[in-house]
Image (tube, rainbow, N blue to C red):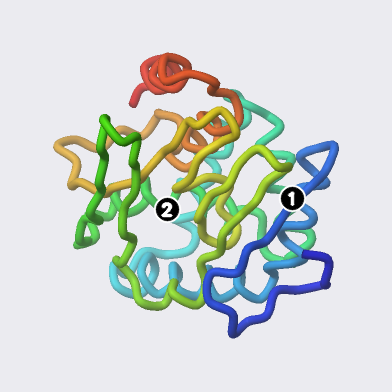
Amino acid sequence: MSSSSVDPNEILPVVKFTGNSPRDIGHQHGLLLKDRIHLTIDFYKKHFLTYKSYSEQFLFSKCEHYRSIISQYNASYIDELDAISISSNVHPLWIIALNIRSEIINHLLLETNECTALYSKTDRLLGQNWDWAEEFEHLAFINYLNSDILQLTEPGVLGKIGFNSSGIGVCLNFVQPVTVVNDSIPLHILLRSILDSSITIQNAVEILKLNGT
């Protein structure tokens, strides 16, 4: 997509990011999806700050904590996230918040409904619905990343549901946790990491095993 922004009325637009560096990709992400990123932040502000009456200061303290974890895991993801923040003109910790939204939901114990996933080993089918919030019908987009990854994700979020050029696919489902873990790699970062680097199922499983999930 070569225009300066994505049509705000288009449902599930296909948006391609290409670049030689994480900053290039992040810049395109923030520029093309600026309006949708702001609307996505508004949505999560309502859920995180209004429904549970938590302060932005408290939320940002969580974001600082996870920013450090992401940086230690793979600093290039921080470069990409910071570039999204700059080109979309939003506070960098709100971009972190979007990428740790699953961890925040776990921490706040928000009531959520699970998605439905489908897998067939015989036919090599993998898929799911994603219907937890109606607002995202006009916010989510399909991301084609450097001709290597095709994924459905949220504005400002690096990784979600999709597959890579090696045929490795990932889905995402929400299940209420027995315990809340505060020091693991954020789920959306792990999903992107799997799609970035896995060429076999064994690679993907090893990424999850090594990073506390």
Q: At 82% across and 43% down in the image, what residue appears? A: 19
Q: Is disc 1 placed on a helix, strand or loop?
A: helix
User: Few, some or many C-alpha atoms within 10 Å of disc 2 (few <14, some 14-19, many ≥20)?
Assistant: some
Three-letter code, disc 2: Arg
Label of residue 26 in the image: 1
Residue 34's image quarter? bottom right
Q: Is residue 186 above or below residue 175?
A: above
Three-letter code, disc 1 = Gly
Viewer-closest of 80 and 59: 80
Direction from residue 208 to residue 121 in the image, left or right: left
In the rendered image, residue 56, in percent from the top left (x then y), is placed at: 48, 63
121 or 147, which is in the foreground? 121
Most extreme residue toward the bottom, as rendered? Answer: 9
Compared across the picture, whether 179 is left or right of 26 comes to: left
* Residue corresponding to mark 2: 101
Residue lying at 25% horizontally and 46% vertically, measured from the top left: 118
| Cα distance between the residues tagged 2 and 1 | 19 Å
List x then y, in percent, for residue 41: 53, 68
Q: Quadrant of the C terminus?
A: top left
Q: Residue furthest left?
A: 178
Q: Secondary structure at mark 2?
A: helix
Mark before the other along the chain sequence, 2 or 1: 1
Question: Which quarter of the figure is the N terminus placed in?
Answer: bottom right
